Amino acid sequence: MGASYEVRGKVAVITLDNPPVNGLGYDTRREYSAGIDRALADPAIAAIVITGAGKAFSGGADIKEFGSPKAIAEPNLLSLIRQTENATKPVVAAIHSVCMGGGLELALGAHYRVAAPGTNVALPEVKLGLIPGAGGTQRLPRVLGVETALNMIVSGEPVKSELLYTVPGQKLFDQIAEGDVVAAACALAEAKAAEHAASGKPLPRVRDMAATHPSPDAYFQFARNMVKGMAKNFPAPAKCVDAVEAAVKRKFDDGMVFEREVFLALMLTPECKALRHAFFAERAASKIPDVPDNTPVRKIEKLAVIGAGTMGGGITMNFLNAGIPVTMLEMKQEALDRGVATIRKNYEAQVKKGKLKQDKYEQRMSLLTTTLSYADIAQADMVIEAVFEEMGVKEKVFKTLDEVMKPGAILASNTSTLDVDKIAAFTKRPQDVIGTHFFSPANVMKLLEVVRGKATAKDVLATVMQLGKKIKKTAVVSGVCDGFIGNRMIEQYSRQAGFLLEEGCTPAQVDRAIERFGFAMGPFRMGDLAGNDIGWAIRKRRYTEKPDMRYSKTADLLCEMGRYGQKTGAGWYDYQAGKRDAIPSPVVVKMIEDHRAALGIKPRKISDDEIVHRLVYSLVNEGAKIVEEGIASKASDIDMVYLTGYGFPLWRGGPMCYADTQGLFNVVQAMKKFAANPLDDAGFWTPAPLLAKLAAEGKTFTP
Ligand code: NAI
């Protein structure tokens, strides 16, 4: 389907029809254009109404066509808008539900606009690193005023139609229509047709209106300063200001040329590429190659969480927020009381900040029950285990679950390091067992690694992925391996950070370099936040499991000094009581220097560039292995894990996208150099076969 044509009295109604949001794909554009021609050619038709079928007027460009020749094939959006604007019969847009991007630009080509209340109106292009490219920056200021229009264009956020209708002097909507918006538009269309026939006046076109501001220079200077502060790593927001300024200062057609030039230039920037990559990667993450979209899912209406500690409490909150009742189970009443108190404390903090209404808070708490007895959770549709990270404890829990849970219940483990296949083998229903690896704090962090065991049934996987969406997480599937996707990669990154200390860096220097690159937090500040003892425990296990894997001893020496991080008031940095500021510690610097001296290493000056590339390319090389082994089904999944769970800078698109931007040939060259450093781990820097192959073929990890 593309667009349908229907006659209502003297009015032709053209309905965009391209589910789910009437994206302006090639077929839709072609049929819309043909509809306009047909209506203009038919003497029985006096006016035209354009609208959208189903749940939207139009969401804008058809994302399925992104980057394909179809996206710009004629009639393209600019041509449609011109055709609409130049129509000799009145065109009225009947707008409802969603009117965004190209959809709004098309509506701005109409002569009149009627909107249903509650319509979400937006020009969201800035979120993909772009500015609107079909006249949005030139027409919106003409109908909404410069300031309101610029706010919408810079933020990309939707605003409700009825709110926009209250903007003084607005000409965006001629009417807000309760009830049948198409009928209201048809009535307006007939009336306008009669009015213009009688008066002979030309039809109003947005392009002929003026975009004015009483003190444009001062205002645009102010807008530029604001945007610079807010969006320092993204070029598009500042370009939005330039484009709207062009609407005020240039003739309409010149403004359109300027908008197009800026749009095309932005399209080529790495930031735009990264944002578009993240947009598609997020959608791609929910697609699993051998689990089709129509895989049946199990009903999840009641949940149980075992363990009311740090993770159990956070996990529970996600489901309460989504309206799903949860029963928390613990071994002792005190543990339950502590868990519930923490949940209350978190919600109360939100209420205090005005982020949560009191009644919503109570409603959420009313969905929570607690128990010490497995009999009370037997009928739950899904159980998430978040008990101590010890195989023996997990074994007991899963054996009990196998005995008590109703058939078909999903049994999930929040383990961060243990083998999900072994956990599944404790039950007689391994097909129902899966890993749900939440990140701390679990009620805040977006990432959910869904760990697919050898035996996990497809419908279990599909159900958990859908549930992930319901609780507003970015769910990414990982196969079973040590650390799954995210932590397996971070181990290599941490190892590099340790080697850098041995070779001459201080923790502050390493953190500063990678934070300048854009990471939310460098590895040492991160260690202090998470607790250095966690890594210590993992390394102790590694020393026996993988004796060939070399680590810097500095982190162990730090832990031997009792410096576990913020929780002990000292880690890689010093901390003042009650504060989180990381203060470089002379004691730690001395410890590193002594260690270096003991190893006979002469420190050298290491550039920020080397620090960043060793850290990031260690992620890339391990990531390539993860894709190759099928632990992740595609490279973009790895980027989603790093963007949503590890503070990787969004404008760089994730480690794999970043490597593509640098050129895989160059990445391999850099690795060869790192391998030649006798203090590093030459074996690790052998490029993963997938990376070597793609680099040799001049290809990339991501599309
Ligand atoms: P925690 O120590 O804060 O909480 C564990 C809770 O489980 C305690 O309240 C304890 O009383 C309870 N518990 C222990 N054995 C039990 C049993 N047999 N039956 C019922 N309750 C029992 O630990 P945390 O940090 O919440 O970790 C839980 C799980 O989540 C672990 O597997 C951990 O590896 C994983 N994880 C932890 C993350 C973190 O950042 N803390 C991140 C991701 C996963």
Image: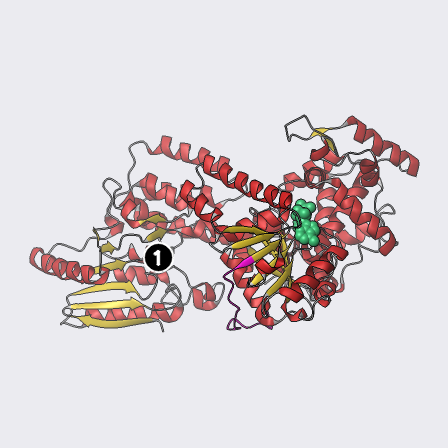
Q: Is residue 10 left or right of residue 293?
A: left
Give yes or no for residue 297 being in the magenta stretch.
yes
What residue is rendered at 35% in x and 47% in y?
Answer: 159
Q: Is residue 563 left or right of residue 58?
A: right
Farthest left residue?
198
| SS majority, magenta | loop
Residue 268 in view in this figure: no
Depicted 56 relative to depicted 680: above or below: below
What residue is rendered at 83% in x and 39% in y?
Answer: 554
Q: How many labels does the image show?
A: 1
Examine the image and state in which quarter residue 534 appears: top right
Q: Is residue 386 left or right of residue 158?
A: right
Residue 231 in view in this figure: yes
On the image, the x and y values in percent for residue 227 come to 46, 38
Task: Give neighbour class at mark 1: few <14, some 14-19, many 20+ (Cα, 10 Å).
Answer: many
Q: Is residue 165 left or right of residue 294?
A: left
In depth, the one of 513 and 162 nearer the eye is 162
In depth, the one of 11 and 394 nearer the eye is 394
Depicted 180 relative to depicted 360: above or below: below
Disc 1 on helix, strand or loop?
strand
The residue that mark 1 highlights is 98
Instruction: Give the residues in magenta.
Output: 287-303
On the image, the x and y values in percent for residue 327 come to 55, 54
On the image, the x and y values in percent for residue 40 come to 20, 68
Scheme of image coloration: secondary structure
Depicted 353 relative to depicted 86: above or below: above
What residue is rendered at 29% in x and 60% in y?
Answer: 82
* Amino acid type, residue under disc 1 in the picture: Val
Depicted 251 relative to depicted 28: above or below: above
Give yes or no for residue 479 being in the magenta stretch.
no
Q: State the quadrant of the N terminus.
A: bottom left
On the image, the x and y values in percent for residue 381 come to 55, 64
